[in-house]
Amino acid sequence: MMKQGGIAAIVWAPDSPHAEHDAQRLNASLHKIHYLRYKRPLLAPIKYVPQCLKTWAVLRRQRPSVVYVIISPVVAALSVYIYCRLSGTPYIMDVHGHSLTSWKWAWTAPLQRALAKRALVNIVNHPGHKRLFESWGAKSLVLERSPMSIPGDRLKQVANPNQYSVTVVSTFTGDEPLELVLGAAEQLPEVRFFILGDTALAKRTLLRAAPDNVVFPGYLLGDEYWNRLYSSQAVMVLTTHPYSLLSGAVEGMALGKPLILSRQPVLTDYFTKGTIFVDNSVESIVDGVRELRGQEHRLTQEIVELAAEKRERWETVFQELLALIGGDPCKASRPGG
């Protein structure tokens, strides 16, 4: 299958480190398809039509032997399915956990089920999701998110030893208790908090309520994003969703940064070292930051160890994926290759 037009990876987003990593390892052509503003629900009905057309155009041009599509949105997988049904091409769905558990996408569950049953295999990141797919009669494989290897020459900024800083990875969606972060920042004036994300999506009241030690750098891409994480002493990502394996947490781990995360089942299962878990309250977040500062050296060592363990685990399951799609492991891209 990896002959002919090779593998095409489809993601409907302007930027996706996760998609870039997996496409590189699969030696796939990555197509980031997106129009108009990102994460604007009101624009979705408008932009999905041209994104479907663009998806069909790139697939017809490449004529891949396998299509690897990352969802959400599930409409991306639907557009891939239509092409694959007409062309006889197998497809793989990489299903982000929030597309299964978020109220926003609950209405798509019947469609996800139908598409999953027709996929060659479905990639999920938690055993609970695997059990769900198997109950649907759909083949699935648990491929946990792997910390990427970021070349050192891309990391130009280093942490300031005289200014303790925490980078908060955010998208300003409803599951992120950012008001609590601002409350914690007020009690930690000696700590600088960088809250990432497109501020056009943030509530004006939230931005106005920020104390002086909170900075909103905006929505960062590529090396700007990696350097923002790398130049902080810790990375914080919070959510009220119990089954969301947060990309920002995996990316912070990739850079060897201790983490402060919400105490949620998927997160506590995955991040077994180098992490401080907090409840969604101001007091718990304040205590978590102080605990991390007191144990920073140990937690930094642990998160580096955990990243190595996760990479090894990912490599093992990745070979199973290659076997399923008929690939030659020797020809797949290696880290840094």
Image (cartoon, helix red, strand yellow):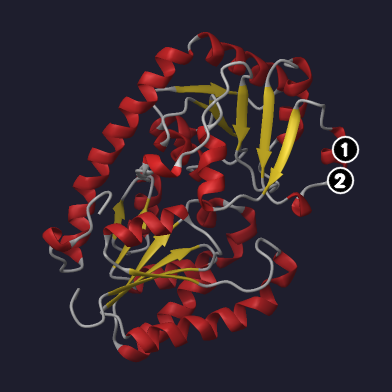
In this view of the protein, which residue sits in the foreground, 8 or 268?
A: 8
Q: Residue at x 59, y 17 (%)?
A: 288
Q: Residue at x 67, y 17 (%)?
A: 286
Q: Residue at x 76, y 15 (%)?
A: 187
Q: Residue at x 70, y 51 (%)?
A: 198
* Mark carried by residue 208: 1
Q: Secondary structure at mark 1?
A: helix
> Number of labelled discs?
2
The kind of residue on which mark 1 rests is: Arg
Q: On the picture, is 248 further left or further right than 327?
A: right
Q: Secondary structure at mark 2?
A: helix
Q: Are marks 1 and 2 in contact (CB under 8 Å)?
A: yes
Q: Dot 2 corresponds to which residue?
A: 204
Q: Where residue 75 appears, x then y in whole percent? A: 54, 73
Residue furthest top in the image: 294
Q: Where residue 2 appears, x then y in whole percent? A: 20, 73
Q: Where residue 111 appears, x then y in whole percent? A: 50, 71
Q: Where residue 291 appears, x then y in whole percent? A: 56, 12
